[in-house]
Image (cartoon, helix red, strand yellow):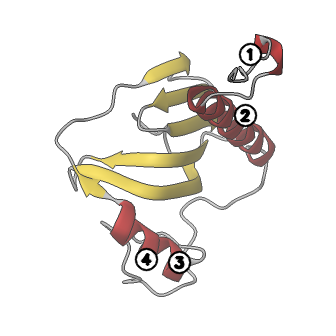
Amino acid sequence: MAVPTRKSRPKSERSPTGNAIARISAVAVLACALGLAFVLVHYPRALNAKPTTSLAQGCVNEGTDRRMAGTVICWAQQRLSWKSDQEPHFVLIGSRQRTSVGLAWPPYFVFNSPDGTGHWRMFRIGFRYDRAWRGYIFPTVALKVLPKPLQY
């Protein structure tokens, strides 16, 4: 009795592998983050706006700036952040004195742009390395107006 053989499909008809799906997902997330940064760069925000929520929300290495959805974000940060002495290596696209995009691994995206009034608009998303805390904080999403560009 002959055993039926399975005919191999052409490469164009095969489903994508795990690596291909990961690459496609990373590109999609980066494209969304870049699009959001460009849209939000012209969104009016005050420099050093006062927090409207209480401090001590439980975020990892918490500062004084406002946390939207602080309860959820801080809970996630407590579980998904980790200590590490290994700082990320950044790739800078653009100029530190003009509009720039910074990329790093673990996935981290930073967009800096002057607003024309002497201030800088900064958008960041991903696994942020905090030198004071000596570790990676995740999840991190921020849109700020700063007196100088964020240094990587």
Quickly name the residue at label 4.
75
First reached walking from the N terminus: tag 3 or tag 1? 1
Q: Could you say which disc has been placed on residue 31 in the image?
A: 2
Residue sitting at 76 percent across and 12 percent down? Answer: 11
Instruction: Tell me how far mark 3 sits from mark 1, CA to CA.
Output: 47 Å
Instruction: Tell me how far mark 2 sits from mark 4, CA to CA.
Output: 27 Å
Q: Closer to the observer: label 4 or label 1?
A: 1
Check disc 2 and report its element: helix, strand or loop.
helix
Instruction: Tell me how far mark 2 sits from mark 1, CA to CA.
Output: 34 Å
Residue 144 point in image, percent of width and height: 58, 54
Q: Which amino acid does label 1 sit on?
A: Ser
Quickly name the residue at label 3.
72
Q: Image height check: is 10 above or below 125? A: above
First reached walking from the N terminus: tag 2 or tag 1? 1
Comparing 52 with 34, the one in front is 34
Q: Closer to the observer: label 2 or label 1?
A: 1
Hey, which quadrant is residue 104 in on the image? top left
Quickly name the residue at label 1.
8
Callout 3 touching callout 4 (CB < 8 Å): yes
